[in-house]
Image (cartoon, rainbow, N blue to C red):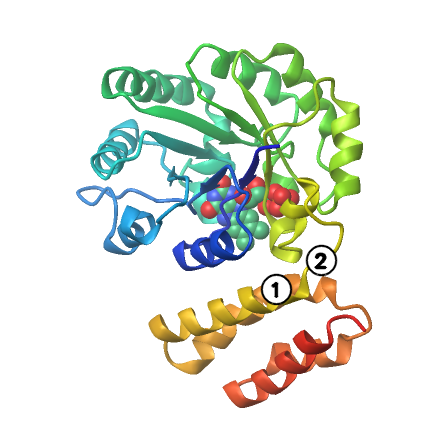
Amino acid sequence: MKIYYAPLEGITGYIFRNAYNEIYGHIGKYFSPFISPAEKCPVTPRERKDVDPANNHGINLVPQILTCSSDRFIEAAKELHAMGYTEVNLNLGCPSGTVCAKGKGAGFLQDTSALQAFLDDIYSYAVSGDMKISVKTRLGYSDPDEFYALLDIFNAFPVSELIIHPRIRSDFYKGEPRKEYFAYALEHSKCPLVYNGNIFSVKDYDELSDRFAGGLDPVMLGRGLIIDPSLADKLNGLTTETDFIKLRRLHDTLYHEYQKIMSPDINVLFKMRELWSYWQNLFDGKDREIKRLLKAKKYADYEDIVYHLLLTGTD
Ligand SMILES: Cc1cc2nc3c(=O)[nH]c(=O)nc-3n(C[C@H](O)[C@H](O)[C@H](O)COP(=O)(O)O)c2cc1C
């Protein structure tokens, strides 16, 4: 089964991808958190560092672009092509208020004629520039029925893969994904489809996969792979248990790598706390320790709690 690692801004940067890929692997494609091209600066030095092939050895990475300007999209795609990339991904799903207010991300789904003109431009470039463009989209901005017209639009272009997160903008990441719209896409899409949303366990995957003829392959996972980094191994039938030794390796690698590039200490702890807000789901009955850990302001306090937790697992 092909598993794609969803882009998670602030989490799945190159340090995370390298650590995950080294310790777990078995990921068909990683998608970078979005690059937001500005005028005269299609890819900032920070974004460039994140997608630089030298920082992504052995990782099948697809850089993602967030913009509603076809000129800016094409400029960024050209820079990425010069770096060796042959696929980029268009973000049509970001629900953030500031992003949508500028007509980008999920906000772009509101203006279908502008979207159509934008796709015309970027797919003309894709054909002449030898670049595949995949799309990651929501069902619509304010009403899931917007999806019917949107799918007709996508069907008119050589979308290399259409990744569908079956929610609308106002759902953010909450509630049940609207799976019936993915079923509609399976029947009516001319583009290869990838499902994304709320797969947190093998059971979640199996239930969903049984529901759709032909199963779900490839599939894109985000938070499920952060909460339980062994989930890809479980889905691939390599294990049935969460591997706490690998989790400790992942933790230690990230903790040390972030210390090399971040300061002061509290910023590293903020980064680790964000991960623990996901990992805490693996530690039943350890609420008190997790609460202390999420408040730790010094490395020593943090390490005391974390190493006790990671040594004892859930016992
Ligand atoms: C913290 C966070 C950051 C995200 N950043 C991005 C992003 O940069 N680009 C994008 O397309 N989606 C982004 N997403 C959405 C995820 O890629 C994914 O679509 C979403 O989490 C649903 O999948 P999941 O239920 O498997 O997590 C983000 C989601 C979260 C929670």
In this image, 281 relative to 63: left or right? right
Residue at image x 65%, y 39%?
197
At label 1, the amino acid type is Leu
Please name whichever residue, 182 or 205, is drawn nearer the observer in this view of the structure.
205
Mark 1 and mark 2: Cα distance apart in space: 8 Å
The 10 Å Cα crowd at callout 2, few under 14, some 14 to 19, many 20 or more, is: some
Say whether residue 199 is visible: no
- SS of the residue under disc 2: loop
In percent of width and height, residue 156 lies at 45, 10
Badge 1 vs badge 2, beta-carbon distance below 8 Å: yes
Residue at image x 20%, y 35%?
82
Q: Which residue is mark 1?
A: 247
In percent of width and height, residue 304 lies at 61, 87
At label 2, the amino acid type is Thr
258, above or below 115, in the image = below
Please name whichever residue, 150 or 16, is drawn nearer the observer in this view of the structure.
16
Q: Which residue is mark 2?
A: 242
